[in-house]
Amino acid sequence: MEQAKVILIKFIVSLIAFSIGLDLFFDATLTDIISFGVTVTAVSYILADRILLPRIGSTNTLMAEFILTYMIVWIFGAILLHGYLQIAWGSAISAIIITAAEVYVHRYLLKHLPERKREIRHHGATPKLRFVTEFAEDDDPTRKK
C-alpha cells in the first residue's frame, strides 16, 4: 500500500509539472500530458526510487532523476510536439518541478519504508579512509651481513 501511495504521488506531481511545463510553451493535449506522466513516473520509480536511492543516497538520486526526467521529456517531446529547441524549456521547467517534489518523496521513502536499507558498497577502497599501514624492515644493499 505504501508503494502505491508513492507511485500515486509521483504521478500527480508529474501531471502538474507537465501541465505547467508543456502547456506554457506548447498546445499540448491532455493525452500528451498523461502519456508523459505515466512514462516518467514508471521509469523514475523503477530506476531512481527502487535502484538508485538505496545505493547512492538522496542527493545523487535527485541529480540523476533530474537528468532522467529532462532527457525523457526532451527526446519524446521533440518527436511528439515537433519543437526541438522550445521543448528544452518545457522539459527543464517540468524537471525542476518534479525534482523539487522528489525531495519530499525521497524523505518519505527513506523514513517510512523499513525494507529500504542503504547498501554501502566499497569497490576497492577502504571504508572511511582507514588505510592499512605495513611496517617492515627494508634490506640495505650496502650493508653486508
Image (cartoon, grey):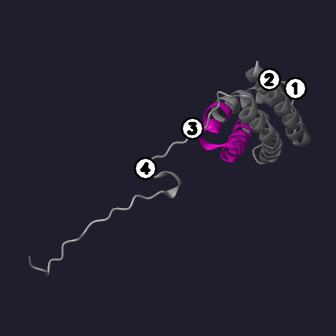
Query: In this rendering, which labeled residue sits more in front, label 2 or label 3?
Result: 3
Q: Is label 2 in a helix, a strand or a loop?
A: helix
Q: Residue at x 81, y 24 (%)?
A: 8
Give the residue number, with chain letter if any, for mark 2.
Answer: 5
Contact? badges 4 and 1 (CB < 8 Å) = no
For the C terminus, the quadrant is bottom left
Contact? badges 2 and 3 (CB < 8 Å) = no
Q: Which mark is residue 119?
A: 3
Give the residue number, with chain letter if any, for mark 4.
Answer: 124
| Residue 20 located left or right of residue 91 | right
Mark 1: amino acid: Leu
Contact? badges 2 and 1 (CB < 8 Å) = no
| Residue 109 located left or right of residue 90 | left
First along the sequence among labels 4 and 2: 2
Mark 2: amino acid: Lys
Give the residue number, with chain letter if any, for mark 1.
Answer: 30
Read off the magenta span. 49-77
Mark 4: amino acid: Gly
Q: Residue pushed farthest front?
A: 145
x and y percentages locating residue 6 in the rendered image? 77, 27
x and y percentages locating residue 124 in the rendered image? 43, 49
Residue nearest the observer in this picture, 57 or 101: 57
Q: CA distance from mark 4 to mark 3?
A: 16 Å
